Image: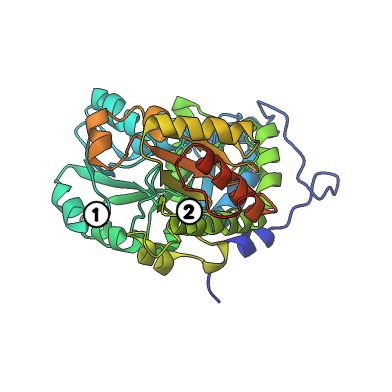
Amino acid sequence: MAFDPANEIQDLQYFGEFGGVNPSISDSSTYTFLSAKTMFDTFEGNTDGCYLYSRHSTPSNLYLGEALAAMEGTETANVAASGMGAITPVLLQLCKAGDHIVSSRTIYGGTYAFLKNFAPGFNITTSFVDITKLDIVEAAITDQTRVLYCETVSNPLLEVADIEALADLAKKYNLKLVVDNTFSPLSISPVKLGADVVVHSLTKFINGSSDTVGGVVCGTQEFIDALRNVNDGASMLLGPAMDSLRASSVLKNLRTLHIRMKQHSHNAMYLAKKFEADGLKTVYPGLPSHPSHEVFTKMMNTEYGYGGMLTIDVGSLEKANELMELMQERNLGYLAVSLGFYKTLFSAPGTSTSSEIPIEEQQEMGLTDGLIRFSIGLDNDIERTYQSMRNCMVYLGILEAIEETV
Ligand SMILES: *Cc1c(COP(=O)(O)O)cnc(C)c1O
């Protein structure tokens, strides 16, 4: 049977301390040891079944980590206080002074800023490339390269990385392939396609309620142990620990992720088809017109669809801003960054989430002024939503009126 990430989550079984159907929350920062010897062993790294201190791990964080590892098909996982709190320790664990990273140039603005502005202070340098051009990726690899970094579906341009092909390259040059799978949970399982480490911002689809930030690193036991090592582990020493109460609430939301992803994908596909038919420049991996439509299709766990993210280009920043303000006024969603909420969220990436990227580079990568990024919500009646969005576009002269759009 093919790997099904939702089944992997479903098949975990929990018994709380008092038989609760949810695991008990461990509301403690520190843990007692029945013998002093066990405490010593735990510091030495023999932590099996023992808790030390909550920056290292907590029962609640381990439950959530276990579920996310099951979803990604990895041996284990380490949760973090935010997506960036997962990503930056991974890169600092894998790269030391003098090392080099080859990264997709279209990545989350914070990750880009970290690689471009922060990591060079530690003499870790990055070449940013068009990740869809394998020859360019390969040409950027040097003797110092340790990591190949990409997002499965990139933010905000929705470029799709061919994980299998990149994994082959990583193997050939003995690199670690690190994949940020935030935009495509369940739809794509990067480790099953050959990635070494998968990171997520839990803030987005996985938690899905826009009430917290969170992150996770999914990987081998050896790598996660290294991140948590009390002597030289980046997660342990930099300290982006998730709180146990949050871990428990994210775990509860994770259980409906498959239902939500199907609806996000269904709604996004519906709107993408309609927008494209209306003549709007629409980017959605589910559209055959998307340059990486086939790559996505080849990699995907079919039933979860092509995800909830799409972009349209309305020509200018002014028009984009007018449209977003009008759609918010008419209660079609919120003018807000982030993604994965029950309501549609929209923003103009050039002036918001990708503003860390210099204007010239934005232009080079095709991040235009009039681009609006949508995280499509869970609307039950997406046809009604479409009609209302269309009305906004007609009102602003972005689309021409057709006979009846009430
Ligand atoms: C939001 C996001 C991040 C950062 O996550 P935080 O939880 O905000 O720290 C990283 N990668 C992608 C693709 C994101 O969308």
Q: Check contact, mark 2 vs mark 1: CB within 8 A.
A: no
Q: Is residue 85 above or below residue 167?
A: above
Q: Amino acid at mark 2?
A: Phe
Q: Quadrant of residue 362?
A: top left
Q: Is residue 281 above or below residue 25?
A: below
Q: Residues within 10 Å of mark 2 (few under 14, many from 20)?
A: many
Q: Quadrant of residue 372?
A: top left
Left or right: where does residue 212 sit relative to residue 360? right
| Closer to us: 49 or 254 | 254
The residue at which mark 2 appears reads as 275
- For the residues labelled 2 and 1, the Cα–Cα distance comes to 43 Å
Query: How many numbered discs sit on the rendered protein?
Result: 2
Q: Quadrant of residue 276?
A: bottom left
Q: Is residue 379 visible?
A: yes
The residue at which mark 1 appears reads as 174
Callout 1 secondary element: loop
Expressed as whole percent of the image width and height from the top left, the position of residue 226 reads: 42, 41
Q: What residue is drawn where x is 61% and y is 54%?
A: 404
| Closer to us: 38 or 303 | 303
Outermost residue to the top: 121
Expressed as whole percent of the image width and height from the top left, the position of residue 89 reads: 41, 34
Q: Amino acid at mark 1?
A: Asn
Q: Residues within 10 Å of mark 1 (few under 14, many from 20)?
A: few
Q: What residue is drawn where x is 65% and y is 36%?
A: 331
Say which mark, if any, is on residue 325.
none
The quarter of the picture where the N terminus appears is bottom right
| Closer to us: 14 or 126 | 126
Outermost residue to the right: 18
Left or right: where does residue 229 sit relative to residue 177? right
Q: Is residue 59 visible?
A: no
